Image (cartoon, rainbow, N blue to C red):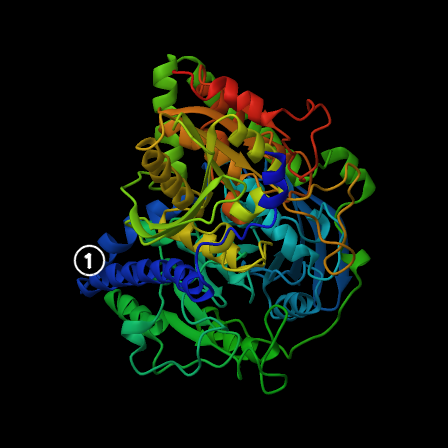
């Protein structure tokens, strides 16, 4: 078969024409859009039944319960946080305290507290959540701290997780963006969320403020800046009744990317659910499935005070969320507690016509000043700029760093992940093998969403021409969920129908022919047929080549998470259906999942964004899908899993992790890990080969490459 191996590399593995491929990929997007529309219709139907306060609370309370559940495990904090003030800077009319407070065990928050000149009565406190652009020392944040402190308020500006003094990576232009994504990825695998950790940091900041007699406990104001600050501010305010006023920018209603002005029929056509993206705090997992859409979160702040805030021009007349907010506040006879602020222009415009800002701009603050003066009697002085350099606002002195034994956040995540994985493994170890398999099937279905296959519908099939005597068959099929898959089946000359190996990889059929032609030829020589499959979102069915954290696949995957599913679950559903389909023709079915992604070198040093080569992403889904298909399908006789992660716990071993969004499994370490999945397949033979770590580097202790064809031949006919 060596001549076939040479010929195989030049075979065109595509089944679909370019227009057919375009339509197939469009169908995946259309299915996502359809389910988004269904989520919006469900929300609209439930909202239409709300006509008074009791009905509103019956509508919103279950949503808030689901929101709390989605954030991660609750943390019990009965005592005020331990707080250290490392420097006090006195100035005219105010002072700045550089402080550190403990958020949770092993996690310290660095913050600047702008304090007013002591007065006779307790004063309001404003907590500002910065954007994903810059940390606490950014100029606009300083301006707000100084201006409001001189106006008689305490102003707390903290570094968010992974920012400022809480960075554990090299700073650089937009480098924090990538780490916001990576931090979220690491938290997801341990069953937590970046939103949950940010909200907890905010709550502990409020705990710290309330230990001070100079702070009015009835006047806690929480403001979230544009671009990622408004998201956690809105959630924290909805869940914490101590917040008396919330000002969340760009969350709940039209976004800077939304069409302006809005259409006349926006009430019916507005996307209340939103879209997925790399920014996990904007598109909360399970939000569409469980009903905590952004507008509901913001409206749940009622009857407490709310300033509905937009960075750019706002179409007040047609904004359907504003109309809903007014109705909700009307249920409480609290319309005077609802206000707004907005800027001018649109996202694509340029200053001064478009009011771009890094945090919250002067134009936006004018209307905020007016509302706070009306509600709290805060007489605002003129806007003040007294900006200081980063060193003056630094909280972590060398002494405090040593005293607190400050650790990178990923080490804290790793400790929690190991604890949860140990608990999951203890639970699995107590079960019989059959019950262990049933537990893993149940838990992975919970993690991935619907994985149950249905019969595949044949769309087209074509035979030939043969290559070196090997019969070639191209097929396109569709699942009942409208997702297409394509196959290239290679059948040996004079096949006995003894066995077939189903092969899947993110790079698809063409990847196998380019990288595994010799091994495929060896299988065919052993009278084992090979079915190369492109599952949905793989191979020729990928929407584009960009699988980075900023790419289209990330957005689609995050949208699936909002809806309660996953792209990995979609692929598994299709693969299980195909494995059953093959069983009707061949006596024995094996599965082979692989990755052809280049690995990063052992001493890889991650460059800043835009500087040097970008890291290669691992593509562990092929091997993982092979193992999962065998877990659910007992007729699968043997498994080859190549290029898989050593385990999802490996993502927690370093500050960096390089994995595409659609290969992440939220909460996986609460159910077990990849080695537990592989172990549960026993006594069916399973070959794990060429595994990688969380940075997509070869594992140092790895055994030599296996002879896959010989191994499969030895096991494919074995009955479990």
User: Vertically, is 714 above or below 271?
Assistant: above
Q: Is residue 635 left or right of residue 188?
A: left
Task: Please state which of residues 309 and 216 is positioned toward the viewer in this rendering.
Answer: 309
Count of numbered labels shown in the rendering: 1
For disc 1, the neighbor class at 10 Å (few under 14, some 14 to 19, many from 20) is few
Residue 438 vertical placement versus 45 (above, below): above
Q: Is residue 96 left or right of residue 488?
A: right
Percent x, y of residue 361: 60, 75
Q: Position of residue 635 (x, y in %)?
A: 35, 25
- Looking at the rendering, which quadrant does residue 138 occupy? bottom right
Residue found 47% across the figure and 68% down from its top: 376
Residue 536 versus residue 349: which sits nearer the camera? Answer: 536
Picture quarter with the N terminus: top right
Quarter where residue 59 is shown: bottom left
Give the secondary structure at mark 1: helix
Q: In this view of the protein, which residue sits in the foreground, 646 or 297?
A: 646
Q: Position of residue 451 (x, y in %)?
A: 35, 39
Residue 483 image offset from top left, x and y in percent? 36, 52
Q: Nearer the viewer, residue 266 or 298?
A: 266
Regarding residue 300, the answer to whether it shows in the image is no
Please identify the quadrant where the C terminus is shown. Answer: top left
Q: Is residue 378 visible?
A: yes
Residue of label 1:
55
Residue lying furthest bottom in this view?
Answer: 353
């Amino acid at each position: 078969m060596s001549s076939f191996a040479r010929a195989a590399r030049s075979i065109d593995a595509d089944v679909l024409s370019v227009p057919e491929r375009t339509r197939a990929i469009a169908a995946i997007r259309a299915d996502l859009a359809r389910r988004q529309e269904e989520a919006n219709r469900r929300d609209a139907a439930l909202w239409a039944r709300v006509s008074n306060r009791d009905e509103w609370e019956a509508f919103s309370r279950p949503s808030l319960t689901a929101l709390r559940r989605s954030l991660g495990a609750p943390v019990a904090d009965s005592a005020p946080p331990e707080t250290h003030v490392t420097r006090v800077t006195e100035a005219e009319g105010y002072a700045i305290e550089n402080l550190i407070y403990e958020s949770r065990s092993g996690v310290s928050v660095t913050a600047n507290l702008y304090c007013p000149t002591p007065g006779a009565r307790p004063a309001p406190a404003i907590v500002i959540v910065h954007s994903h652009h810059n940390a606490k020392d950014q100029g606009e944040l300083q301006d707000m701290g100084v201006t409001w402190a001189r106006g008689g308020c305490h102003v707390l500006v903290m570094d968010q997780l992974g920012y400022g003094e809480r960075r554990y990576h090299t700073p650089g232009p937009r480098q924090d963006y990538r780490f916001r994504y990576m931090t979220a990825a690491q938290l997801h695998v341990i069953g937590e969320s970046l939103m949950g950790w940010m909200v907890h940091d905010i709550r502990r900041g409020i705990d710290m403020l309330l230990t001070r007699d100079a702070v009015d406990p009835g006047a806690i104001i929480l403001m979230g800046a544009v671009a990622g600050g408004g998201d956690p501010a809105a959630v924290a305010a909805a869940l914490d009744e101590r917040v008396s006023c919330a000002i969340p920018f760009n969350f709940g209603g039209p976004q800077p990317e939304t069409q302006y002005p809005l259409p006349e029929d926006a009430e019916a056509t507005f996307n209340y659910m939103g879209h997925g993206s790399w920014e996990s705090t904007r598109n909360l997992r399970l939000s569409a499935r469980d009903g905590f859409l952004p507008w509901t979160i913001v409206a749940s702040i009622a009857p407490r005070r709310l300033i509905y805030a937009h960075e750019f021009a706002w179409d007040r007349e047609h904004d359907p969320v504003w109309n809903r907010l007014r109705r909700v506040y009307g249920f409480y006879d609290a319309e005077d507690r609802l206000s707004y602020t907005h800027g001018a222009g649109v996202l694509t415009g340029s200053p001064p016509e478009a009011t771009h800002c890094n945090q919250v701009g002067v134009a936006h603050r004018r209307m905020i000043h007016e509302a706070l003066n009306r509600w709290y009697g805060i007489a605002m002085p003129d806007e003040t700029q007294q900006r200081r350099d980063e060193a003056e606002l630094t909280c972590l002195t060398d002494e405090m760093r040593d005293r607190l034994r400050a650790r990178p956040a990923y080490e804290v995540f790793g400790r929690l992940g190991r604890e949860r994985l140990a608990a999951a493994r203890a639970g699995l170890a107590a079960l019989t093998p059959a019950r262990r398999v049933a537990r893993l099937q149940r838990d992975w279905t919970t993690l991935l969403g619907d994985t149950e296959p249905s019969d595949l519908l044949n769309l087209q099939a074509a035979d030939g021409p043969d290559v070196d005597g090997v019969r070639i068959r191209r097929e396109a099929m569709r699942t009942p969920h409208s997702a297409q898959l394509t196959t290239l089946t290679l059948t040996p000359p004079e096949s006995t129908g003894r066995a077939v190996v189903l092969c899947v990889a993110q790079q698809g059929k063409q990847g196998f022919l380019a990288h595994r032609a010799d091994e495929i030829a060896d299988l065919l020589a052993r009278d084992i047929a090979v079915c190369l499959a492109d599952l949905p979102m793989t191979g020729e069915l990928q929407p584009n080549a960009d699988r980075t954290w900023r790419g289209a696949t990330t957005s689609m995957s995050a949208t699936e998470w909002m809806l309660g599913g996953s792209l990995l679950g979609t692929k598994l559903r299709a693969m299980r259906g195909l494995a059953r389909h093959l069983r009707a023709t061949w006596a024995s079915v094996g599965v082979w999942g692989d990755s052809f992604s280049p690995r990063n070198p052992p001493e890889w040093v991650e460059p800043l964004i835009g500087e040097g080569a970008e890291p290669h992403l691992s593509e562990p889904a092929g091997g993982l899908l092979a193992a999962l298909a065998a877990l659910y399908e007992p007729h699968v006789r043997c498994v080859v899993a190549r290029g898989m992660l050593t385990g999802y716990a490996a993502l927690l071993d370093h500050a960096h992790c390089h994995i595409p969004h659609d290969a992440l499994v939220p909460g996986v370490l609460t159910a077990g890990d990849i080695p537990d999945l592989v172990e549960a397949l026993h006594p069916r033979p399973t070959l794990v080969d060429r595994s990688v770590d969380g940075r997509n580097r070869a594992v140092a202790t790895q055994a030599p490459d296996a002879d896959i064809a010989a191994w499969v031949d030895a096991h494919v006919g074995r009955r479990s």
